[in-house]
Amino acid sequence: MSTASPKDVTRLLIQLTGGERAVLEELLTLIYGELRSLAANYLRRERPDHTLQPTALVHEAYLRLVDQTQVNWQNRAHFFGVAAQMMRRILVDHARAHNAGKRGQDFQKLSLDENIDQAFERGAELVALDDALKLLAEVDEQKARIVELRYFGGLSVEETAEVLGVTPVTVKRHWRMTKAWLYGQMQKQ
């Protein structure tokens, strides 16, 4: 992960929010390694023949992130929370496109280990998880964000708590309950 101070990243993000686009190069230098690690972590969970590479995923997410004009970046954790969401969207869109070509074929029933932390190896499972998260967000947006930040974003309990403005104890409690709920939803499919 990056050796850059979270305060340096936060300072640059605040400058970017203020319209100082000249900080983009310095910001990218500070966060690129961490974004690349996040992307590589995501792609390790994907099917072996996945066509996206970590570098392409980072570039796509970064372009979408810095193109955001309505975001008021709060800090490093907020940025990486949004980055996690962007990468999730890119991978889910990619999985949906990949699965679209297979319509009409028999799909295997999804099976998950009770530990939702474990990798999903097939695109269909990623799409199913995304569908379950959308349903969860309708019921409890905060719990859906916790999954997104922890599982997809790779944020620690403390970083997740910082992004959401709650205590680490709350994140841990919701994380446990949410994994069980997602497991139940995935079993229904």
Image: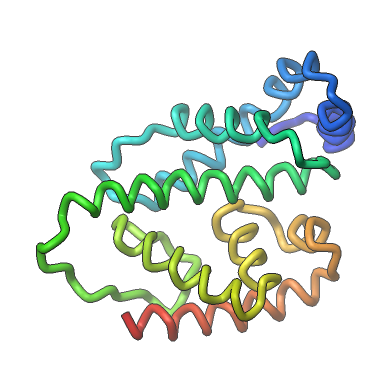
Position in image of residue 175 (x %, y %): 64, 74
Q: In which image quadrant can residue 110 be found?
A: bottom left
15 over 79 or under it: above or below: above
9 over 20 or under it: above or below: below
Position in image of residue 143 (x %, y %): 66, 73
Q: Residue furthest front?
A: 70
Taking 39 as reference, is 10 left or right?
right
Residue at position x 59%, y 60% from top? 148
How are the colours assigned in the image? rainbow
Residue at position x 43%, y 79% from top? 114
Taking 88 as reference, is 147 left or right?
right
Q: In which image quadrant can residue 68 be found?
A: top right
Quarter placement of the N terminus:
top right
Q: Nearer the viewer, residue 160 or 13?
A: 13
Taking 81 as reference, is 54 left or right?
left
Taking 26 as reference, is 63 left or right?
left
Residue at position x 38%, y 60% from top? 126
Position in image of residue 181 (x %, y %): 52, 83
Q: Residue furthest left?
A: 105
Quarter placement of the C terminus:
bottom left
Residue at position x 77%, y 41% from top? 71
Position in image of residue 59 (x %, y %): 52, 27
